[in-house]
Amino acid sequence: MKIKTKDLVYMAFYAALFMVLDYLTNMLGFLQMPKGGSVGLSTIALLACSYHLGWKKGVLVGIVSVMIQFVTGPMYIPDMLGFCMDYLIAFSVYGLASLFPNYGYVYFGVLVTNGIRFLSHTIGGIIVWEVDPWGSVVYNAPYMAATCVLGLVLMPFINERVIKKLKD
């Protein structure tokens, strides 16, 4: 993968945007779910990066963004498997969004990546946090559903009005 200077600048921009949106999420109480988790505003930056720069650079920005999360807010890491399931896999997967086709305003990349993140959190809840399967689903479903809806609503707008202009 060859990274041009322009791409590196865009990648830094998306990582910085991730940081700002993650910080904002942690500051705004209404984005926090009562039992834990939060609506993932920051995932919009990762999705936009994937659609703009492609999946390889998108995954790389996702991995860098996980490291940035150490700065922007609390991370609950019981062990390495927990870190991988709840952070590394859960956020780097958004870089893969551009691999899936869009049908009109339905962005399957948003659906698939949020689905994989939901599975990663749910399996992590069962294995790492030792929560029963239904308890893990009930815990993760509300904020993941809200994050998915947010992405499905915002990404067509962002892609059509911003990303396509940046590619020109």
Image (cartoon, grey):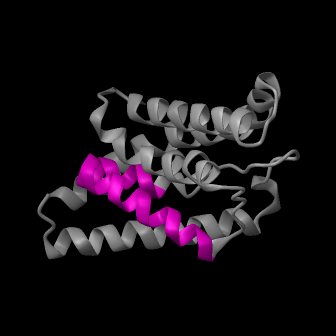
> Which quadrant of the structure image shows residue 128?
top right
Residue at image x 49%, y 52%? 44
In the image: residue 68, left or right of residue 106: right
Please determine whether, in this image, residue 40 is positioned above or below residue 146: below
Query: Observer-nearest residue: 125 or 93?
Result: 125
Q: Residue furthest right?
A: 34
| Image quarter in which the N terminus is found | bottom left
Please determine whether, in this image, residue 5 is positioned above or below residue 77: below
Q: How many marks?
A: 0
Q: Position of residue 78 (x, y in %)?
A: 72, 56
> Which quadrant of the structure image shows residue 69?
bottom right
- Queried whether the magenta region covers residue 32, the answer comes back as no
| Image quarter in which the C terminus is found | bottom left
Residue 6 seen in the current view: yes
Please determine whether, in this image, residue 122 is positioned above or below residue 57: above
In the image: residue 130, left or right of residue 12: right
Q: Position of residue 118 (x, y in %)?
A: 60, 34
In the image: residue 122, left or right of residue 67: right
Query: Observer-nearest residue: 136 or 44?
Result: 136
Q: Which residues are magenta?
A: 45-71
Residue at image x 75%, y 49%? 37
- Queried whether the magenta region covers residue 64, the answer comes back as yes
Residue at image x 37%, y 48%? 95
Q: Position of residue 142 (x, y in %)?
A: 75, 35
In the image: residue 129, left or right of residue 4: right
Residue 145 seen in the current view: no
Q: Position of residue 103 (x, y in %)?
A: 33, 24
Please determine whether, in this image, residue 102 is positioned above or below residue 55: above
Query: Observer-nearest residue: 113 or 146?
Result: 113
Could you tell me what secondary structure mostly forms the magenta stretch?
helix
Query: Observer-nearest residue: 91 or 150?
Result: 91
